[in-house]
Image (cartoon, helix red, strand yellow):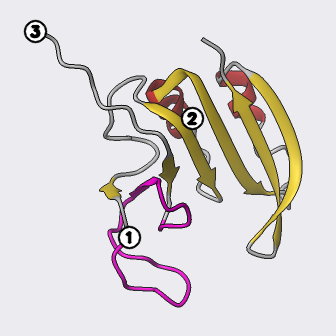
Amino acid sequence: MQTQAKMIALLDIGGEGRYATAINLNPSGEKTLGPDKGTAIPNWIGGRAEDIPLPDRSVQAIVMERTPLRKEAIDEIARVATEDATLVFRHTVDQPSDPHARIVERISGKAEVARVTLDGQPVQQLTIRRTA
């Protein structure tokens, strides 16, 4: 008898607890920023974006903010996201090239780009809505 993997509603890659219901993937189990520095990260699982310790197609929504966008990380996000997942990437725009170009090339879906402010800093937000 096969058991079905538990679906994760929201995975925050590099997260420290910004989203109350998110599972926070972070190499450190303690917050590294802000006034709560040194306190435990809620809903924490240890790991990095390049090697997400979750089953294939087990995450319905992913947020990645200001975490390095290596090729291996993009491949792992594509692997763990469900076929109808929503993926949100927020990265600084002070780079000479589009910080999200490699994501759009690798992960199919309806892509929307916007400029938003995150913790007082302007960032580019890429939202990809995959369709099953």
- Which tag is nearer the camera, tag 2 or tag 3? 3
Ranked by sequence position, the earlier of labels 3 and 1 is 3
Q: Position of residue 60 (x, y in %)?
A: 51, 32
Pointer 3 residue: 1
Residue 51 sits inside the magenta stretch: no
What is the quadrant of the C terminus in the image? top right
Question: In the image as oriented, which residue stretches furthest toward the front?
Answer: 21
Pointer 1 residue: 41
Q: In what element is the residue under mark 2? A: helix
Q: Which residues are magenta?
A: 16-40
Looking at the rendered structure, the kind of residue marked 2 is: Ile
**27 shown above or below 83:** below
Q: Position of residue 46 (x, y in %)?
A: 31, 56
Q: Badge 2: few (under 14), some or many (20 or more) residues near its Cα, within 10 Å?
A: some
Q: Badge 3: few (under 14), some or many (20 or more) residues near its Cα, within 10 Å?
A: few
Looking at the rendered structure, the kind of residue marked 3 is: Met
Looking at the rendered structure, the kind of residue marked 1 is: Ile
**12 shown above or below 55:** below
- Which tag is nearer the camera, tag 3 or tag 1? 3
Q: Residue at x 59, y 56 (%)?
A: 67
Q: How far, Cα to Cα, is label 3 from label 1?
A: 35 Å
